[in-house]
Image (spheres, rainbow, N blue to C red):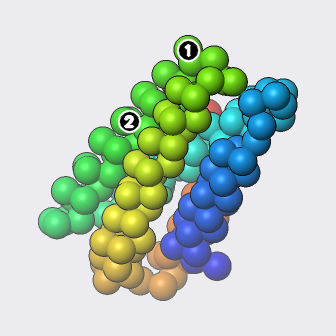
Amino acid sequence: MNVLDVLKDDHATVERLFSTILATSATDLGRRNQLFDALKEAILKHAHAEEAVFYPALRDRQPAHDMVEHGIGEHHAVAGLLARMNGIPADSDDWIDTLGTIREKLLDHVREEEGDIFPKARQLLGDDRLDEMARTFLSAKEHDRPH
Ligand SMILES: [Fe+2]
Ligand SMILES: [Fe+2]
C-alpha cells in the first residue's frame, strides 16, 4: 500500500461514518455523540498527518503548491465547522443540517485531493517515496496530536 491508497482508505472510512451518523435517530443521542466523536477524531488526525507528511512533499512546485494551500484552507474550514457542532444540540435539525454541510465540504475536498493532488503526487514523487510515505503518514496519525 502506498500513501495514496492509505489516504483513499481514510476518505472512504470517513464517508461511511457520515452515512452511519446521519442515519442515527435523535432518540439515541449516546450513539450519535459517540459516532460523532469518532468521526471528528478520524477527520482531524487525517488532516493533521496529511499536512505533516503528504502536503509538504508537494509544496515546492507549482501548481501543486497552490493545490496544497487550497487544501489546507479547506481543512481549517472543516475544523471550524466541527468545532461549531459542539454548540448545537445533537437532537436538533440544525445539528443534522450542519453535519450534512460538513460532509458536502469534505466530499468536495476529497474529490480535489483524489482528482488533482493525487495525480500530481504520482507525477512528482516516485513509487518508493509514495510507499515510504505510507509508513510515515500512519505513524504521524498514530503519534502526533492534532491541534
Ligand atoms: Fe485527505
Ligand atoms: Fe485533506
Q: Quadrant of residue 77?
A: top left
Pointers 2 and 1 in contact (C-beta within 8 Å): no
* Inter-mark Cα distance, 2 to 1: 18 Å
In the rendered image of this protein, does residue 117 appear above or below residue 19? Answer: below
> Label 2: how many residues lie within 10 Å, few (<14), some (14-19) or many (20+)?
few
Which residue carries the number 2 mark? Answer: 76
Q: Would you identify the image quadrant in which residue 19 lies?
A: bottom right
Which residue is tagged 1? 87
Residue 130 point in image, percent of width and height: 50, 75
- Furthest residue toward top: 87
Disc 1 secondary structure class: loop
Horizontal relation, residue 101 to residue 10: left or right:
left
Percent of width and height locating residue 65:
22, 58
Q: How far from the left and from the top, in percent, is residue 3?
A: 55, 70
x 67%, y 58%: residue: 16
Residue 46 visible in the snapshot: yes
Q: Give the secondary structure at mark 2.
A: helix
Quadrant assignment, res 124: bottom left
Residue 101 drawn above or below residue 9: above
Q: Who's the residue at 60% across and 57% down the image?
A: 15
**38 vs 133, nearest the viewer:** 38
Q: Residues within 10 Å of mark 1 (few under 14, many from 20)?
A: few
